[in-house]
Amino acid sequence: MTKRVLLIGHPVAHSYSAFMQQAAFDALGIDARYELVDTTVAALPERIEELRGDEFLGANVTIPHKERAATLVDRLTEDAHATGAVNTISKDGHKLVGHNTDVPAFRDALDVLIGKQKMPRAAVVLGAGGGARAVVHALITLGFQRVTVFNRHLHRGEALVRHFGRSAAHMELKAMPWHESVIESELSKTKVLINATSVGLASGESPIPGEVIPPELLVMDLVYNPPETRLLRDAAAAGASALQNGEFMLLRQGAFAFELWTGQPAPVELMREQIEVARSASAGWDKEDAHDSGGGAGEAGGTGAAGGTAAAGQAAAAGDSA
């Protein structure tokens, strides 16, 4: 029987995960199919319950369901429990186990961003969703002493801070209002900026103005499509020390997930190559979207090769992995 693995989110069109996961299954001779399943909030409980069937190896969970999914599985691993968010579901018999492979993936990505420099101790995080929770948890466990969270809706940022209240008792973790002057002030006191919002998926947009970005900043944008976001371009122009998009984190979390589903080492180099294939294919989809809509790729009504709107396809490439 062909096994199934689902990517559960809304939207999921144009996700890179299908490219790398299906290629990995095929390369190792695993009879499994990776499927993108657009799932609304109302349909999420039934979709996750379906995973108990014998034909399923598990699932990836992406925006906007990571936090809700944590309440729908039978058991949470340490990182999933700590973040209150699940991006990968594996099976233990018919029991569902929720994991957060974004956490170790972000740690690996941060190591690459920092390079040979000393690990900083202060960071600014944009966003308060499932991806941001993984980032903040990783920063706490890495010994950061000061983390400031900005979210357009302040109450969500404050909820994130409350969630980590106990584990962050040794450090300064705070949420602040999304005002340019406040963001600029906080960035002047930090070394690392992480964008964990979905802003940047549409070409030309950035979550913050380029003029508030100081020089010599280390900047990571969890968005991987487009590969060079406006935020990264602005940071480069401001004299950033190092830049990184979300592709490496996507690769690492995908490799961790593959190993959870199969019990076999992930063919990481092949998966990396497939991300490059997906990037090329996505560029082609964007051109089709622009042609079909008679305008920009992000305009409503442009239908991409995977059957979703252009905006929906781009949203699947958000920082909330998969």
Image: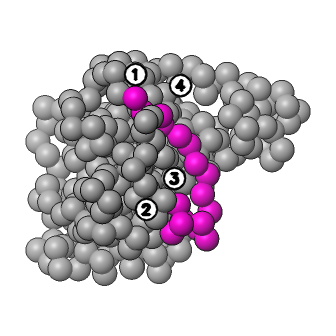
Q: Kindly report the distance in space between the C-alpha atoms of the residues bearing marks 2 and 1.
A: 27 Å
Residue for point 42% across, 66% down: 69
Q: Kindly report the distance in space between the C-alpha atoms of the residues bearing marks 3 and 4.
A: 21 Å
Q: Is residue 253 magenta?
A: no
**Callout 3, which amino acid?**
Ile
Residue ID for mark 2: 66
Residue for point 14% across, 55% down: 142
Specify the quadrant of the image occupied by residue 98.
bottom left
Which label number is shown at residue 26? 1
Circle 3 packing at 10 Å, graded few (<14), some (14-19), many (20+), is many
Q: Is residue 2 visible?
A: yes
Residue 214, image x and y in percent?
A: 38, 47
Residue 188, image x and y in percent?
A: 33, 56
Circle 4 packing at 10 Å, graded few (<14), some (14-19), many (20+), is many
Q: Nearer the viewer, residue 28 or 10?
A: 28
Q: Kindly report the distance in space between the C-alpha atoms of the residues bearing marks 1 and 4.
A: 20 Å
Residue ID for mark 4: 279
Q: Nearer the viewer, residue 218 or 109?
A: 109
The mark closer to the camera, 1 or 4, is 1
Helix, strand or loop status at disc 3:
strand
Residue 124 position (above or below residue 60): below
Image-based side of 318 in relation to 123, left or right: right
Image-based side of 67 in relation to 317, left or right: left
Residue ID for mark 3: 8
Q: Kindly report the distance in space between the C-alpha atoms of the residues bearing marks 4 and 2.
A: 24 Å
The mark closer to the camera, 3 or 1, is 1
**Callout 1, which amino acid?**
Asp
Magenta residue span: 31-48
The quarter of the image holding the N terminus is top left
The mark closer to the camera, 2 or 1, is 1
Image-based side of 231 in relation to 39, left or right: left
Q: Nearer the viewer, residue 16 or 190?
A: 16
